[in-house]
Image (cartoon, rainbow, N blue to C red):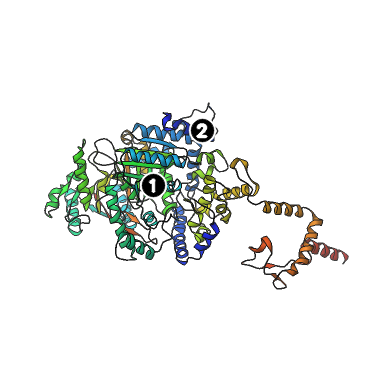
Amino acid sequence: MSTSGRVEFIENIRKALDRNDSFQRSLDDVIQKEPDTDDLRLLETIAGRDTTAGLALLDQLMEAGKRENVNVLTVMDAAAAGAAIVEIAAEKNAEWGDRKVVVAWDHPLVKRIALSTCLASLDIPVYFPDVDPVAADGQATFRRYAEEAFIGVTSADYCIAQTATLTMKSRPGQPRCASLLPSIHIAVIRLDQMLTTLKELYTLLKWNPAEQAECITRCMTFITGPSKTADIEATLVHGAHGPRELFIIVLTG
Amino acid sequence: MNTSNYQTRAITAIEDPILQAALTNLQQRLGQGAADGYQRFPEGPELRLKGHDIRMNAIDHLDILLSALVDKIEQNGGHVHFAPDARTAVDQCIAIARRHDVSMAVKGKSMLTEEIGLNPALEAAGIETVETDLGEYIVQLAGETPSHIIAPAIHKSREAVGRLFRDKLGIPYTDDPPTLTLAARQALRKKFLQADMGISGCNLACAETGHITTLSNEGNIRMATTLPRVHVAFMGMERIVADLADHDILLRLLSMGAAAQDMAGYVSYIGGPAEKGRTDGPDAFHLIIVDNGRSRILADSDFREILCCIRCGACLNMCPVYGKIGGHAYASAYSGPVGAVVTPLLTGINQASDLCLGESLCGACMPACPVNINLPRMLLLLRAKLAEGDASWNVKIQSRAEQAAFTAWSYLLRNRFLYDLFLKGAYLGQRFLPGTHTMIRRLPFAGKDWTRGRDLKRLAGRSFIQRYRSENQRRKIK
């Protein structure tokens, strides 16, 4: 173990903190191990949300979307979501290649939209990743399409209404680059995936049994708005490295 | 790094009208923006105090938190390296690059890698290293150093960036920020797609879940940590908190302090290499945890508080000194009030004395800080060490002459007879000094600098106490 220098490094910190050998606390002594009443109340609120509450959150999301330059679209069902995506695809231009290419997650909600069929009318191919296990050439192929793509369609775990933040954990069939490499990122979510605040998200991540079981995974990402920079004379410009436009399509049906 | 010539660099900065306009704009926008934003937290501005408590508690349990983080990351197939000093950290990174056959690396912005001098060392080892944050990219192309923790190229005008991109990227000259940003987007995309290794910093790790976090608005860090085969993250050993509840508060404080945002554009929690068989994500994840003088700060309870710093740059955006002299005057990866405290502590208090002596002690940095660090207290303490010397920090008395002068002065103040004698002498002597009959234009010797920009009122013939006594006397007689 000490080949990495870990023992000496930590021992040095213990010395600096003036620990003696009898100091034997562990992480469990430092962190909150049981949800407190506030946490429980919040979990209850989240679990008890109905469509009316969801629609109220949607209004908040629209407001936040304006501030964060996120286009929030509401549609009744998957067919309407498909039509909305076709409209975007017809209007926007390819950025990284000569032809229009779309990549999308292998995700139940995205699959319901039947993107390939929808976009066939525009002659735009849609590529999905292999689901676990992915062969090496499968990785390279999807990456090549993602590099070329002008639109990436994903879902998300949650959408935080107050800040228009999408959150997603790394999972099979849901590549990280689909929300990163294409010029336009479209995330499709259901109304019941909306949360009010980041605090609700963190409370779920920490105390919800399903979330606890899955852990945070190797990579969890929060996305708030399109890629942006203000590094030249503090002038805000969208599309620094990641997507220059972000759409959130909320299925209300 | 050379923190001498502070004065020369400060004067150069003050005489640069473009820089002055940029600094004023930055402070009005970000400084005021964060101050307003603190008021809008649902928990109120007191959230800053809560943030301070969380950070302090984390620092007090640093050994426990780091051990938990390391265990989790190793369980998840990541490699953790421990670097007591800058040289070791750099060597570890080069060794990782060699082992993975890396010829090009893309980097996210990391002040720690500036501190340890990573880029020149990688270049010397034959590894092309490309900064990808737009500001850092501009600074790297220009062969300069960042002048702000969050806005590295704040010192460059759009015209200067236009000329730079014309010369280095071969595009037609333009001073239009969107066009310039697009040029960088296209040039850097090629680098992202070709790079073998991605290098990032770590904003704040989470001990409970075993993740580092990176925050950005451009998406460059997501690119650098998703596309290349290898991800190497550098983390100052103090950049960790206990659990996700702490993150809820601190990431909001960090986003507000850094860029007056409710939440940064992109936040990534990274806890190891990508799971086997996934479509994307790096095959290898290495975390290099760096001490480089931090444990020495940790051991001193007077300065431990500076380890709470989350490097958001908010204090720079409020500091009247930074607002005039800019980041380059500090000649350190860390500028502004935080740089004036942390740079002397990391590199030597005597060597970097100009930095803490240059700050005005006005106190603007403390309410600007999202975790309410008492920077003025530590600035004053550093100055005390410079005045009196301190063996435990190897501080030599900065100026024997100043110390002698103040010893004499305090002796004089405690002795009525000598003090009156001194005043009498000074009163008689001042008529040899140039000026009008009420004002002195120039003081001699050490006082010369004091009267460079202002006049000094001449001493009255009789001191206040003398007049008070004689006035009392006069009234009694009446």
Residue in the foreground of this view, choosing between B347 and B252: B347
Residue B326 at x, y percent in the picture: 48, 59
Q: Is residue A56 shown to the viewer in this render? A: yes
Q: Is residue B246 shown to the viewer in this render? A: no
Q: Residue at x 32, y 66 (%)?
A: B174
Q: Residue at x 30, y 48 (%)?
A: B223
Q: Quadrant of residue A35?
A: top left
Q: Residue at x 84, y 65 (%)?
A: B475
Residue in the foreground of this view, choosing between B102 and B374: B102
Specify the amino acid type for callout 2. Answer: Arg
> In the shown orientation, is residue B302 left or right of residue B243?
right
Identify the residue under disc 2: A14
Q: Chain of mark 2?
A: A
Secondary element at tag 1:
helix
Identify the residue under disc 1: B124
Other residues around mark 1 within 10 Å, as few (<14) / some (14–19) / many (≥20):
few
Residue B71 at x, y percent in the picture: 39, 32
Residue B66 at x, y percent in the picture: 44, 35
> In the shown orientation, is residue B44 left or right of residue A60?
right
Are labels 1 and 2 assigned to the same chain?
Answer: no
Other residues around mark 2 within 10 Å, as few (<14) / some (14–19) / many (≥20):
many
Quarter occupied by the N terminus of chain A: top left
The residue furthest top is: A22
Specify the amino acid type for callout 1. Answer: Ala
> In the shown orientation, is residue B169 left or right of residue B307?
left
